[in-house]
Image (cartoon, helix red, strand yellow):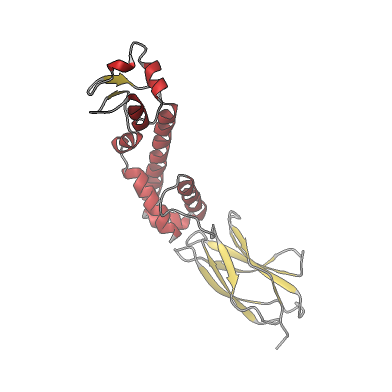
């Protein structure tokens, strides 16, 4: 779902044209007074103030306001910023599309392979207040242990998601609070960046000891650690 939201966001920013953004800004460099419109109403419509319009038109007298009168609009700092933001967002969307094409992947699959980029796009869309774009409580990769009462030598199931797709990962284990992780296995993620693998609880682990597992990409860029749990009795 997070990949879908990010994909829709990328597609949205690449198809938005300068015209569509300009319409959202309201008024241009000059604006005609509408029928029955007061100076204050024009200012509200153009997201400025009556005083600013008067300053931009020093020869204007309030008594001269009438329908069809063309007035110069004050310089809009916010509008300039919006224009720059618009260009930056559009360029970012185009670059993601180009990168996906260069990799021979769809945008959705490319973002699945790039969980950090996927998360950054979602967070950016969330900051912009775009509807339907949310990181929710789940960000980045995650790993869980489904069998949490195993004893020494018994296997537990690791389920990971949000990892890069189709890459080698190292699986590590830590026995005892504060102990270092050591690598016990290798595996390959799916194209969607998921992983399900059975791994054993170390033979030297003792009942009641705290244990945790870690999954890390071979290049060391992504690493996730499971919630710790207590080793069960030896069967």
Residue 14 is drawn in which quadrant?
top left
Q: Tell me residue 186's x, y (percent).
A: 59, 68
Q: Name the residue located 55 percent from the left edge and 68 percent from the top edge.
A: 187
- Rendered position, 127 above or below 192: above
Q: Tell me residue 157's x, y (percent).
A: 58, 76
Of residues 192 and 217, the one nearer the viewer is 192
Q: Tell me residue 192's x, y (percent).
A: 45, 63
If the image is split into quadrants, where does the N terminus sit?
Answer: bottom left
- Rendered position, 195 above or below 220: below
- Rendered position, 30 above or below 16: above
Of residues 93 and 109, the one nearer the viewer is 93
Residue 98 is drawn in which quadrant?
top left
Of residues 153 and 53, the one nearer the viewer is 53
| Left or right of residue 117, residue 11 in this image | left
Q: Name the residue located 39 percent from the left edge and 48 percent from the top edge.
A: 10
If the image is split into quadrants, where does the C terminus sit?
Answer: bottom right
Question: What residue occupies the far bottom of the structure in this picture?
Answer: 235
Q: Name the residue located 39 percent from the left edge and 36 percent from the top edge.
A: 86
Residue 4 is drawn in which quadrant?
bottom left
Q: Tell me residue 49's x, y (percent).
A: 41, 26
Question: What residue occupies the far top of the structure in this picture?
Answer: 59
Of residues 68 and 21, the one nearer the viewer is 68
Badge count: 0
| Left or right of residue 220, residue 180 in this image | right
| Left or right of residue 176, residue 112 in this image | left
């Amino acid at each position: 779902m997070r990949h879908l939201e990010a994909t829709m966001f990328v597609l949205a920013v690449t198809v938005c044209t300068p015209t569509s953004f300009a319409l959202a800004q309201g008024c241009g460099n000059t604006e005609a007074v509408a029928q029955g419109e007061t100076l204050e109403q024009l200012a509200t419509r153009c997201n400025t103030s009556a005083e600013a319009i008067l300053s931009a038109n020093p020869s204007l007298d309030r008594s001269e306001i009438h329908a069809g009168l063309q007035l110069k609009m004050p310089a809009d700092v916010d509008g300039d910023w919006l224009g720059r933001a618009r260009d930056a967002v559009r360029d970012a969307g185009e670059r993601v599309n180009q990168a996906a094409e260069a990799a021979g992947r769809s945008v959705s699959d490319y973002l699945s392979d790039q969980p950090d980029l996927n998360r950054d796009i979602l967070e950016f869309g969330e900051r912009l207040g775009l509807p339907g774009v949310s990181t929710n409580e789940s960000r980045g990769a995650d790993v869980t242990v489904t069998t949490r009462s195993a004893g020494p030598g018994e296997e537990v199931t690791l389920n990971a998601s949000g990892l890069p797709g189709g890459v080698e990962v190292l699986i590590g284990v830590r026995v005892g609070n504060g102990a270092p992780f050591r690598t016990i296995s290798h595996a390959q993620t799916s194209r969607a960046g998921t992983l399900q693998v059975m791994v054993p609880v170390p033979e030297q682990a003792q009942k009641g000891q705290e244990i945790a597992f870690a999954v890390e990409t071979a290049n060391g860029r992504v690493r996730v650690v499971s919630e710790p749990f207590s080793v069960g009795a030896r069967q």
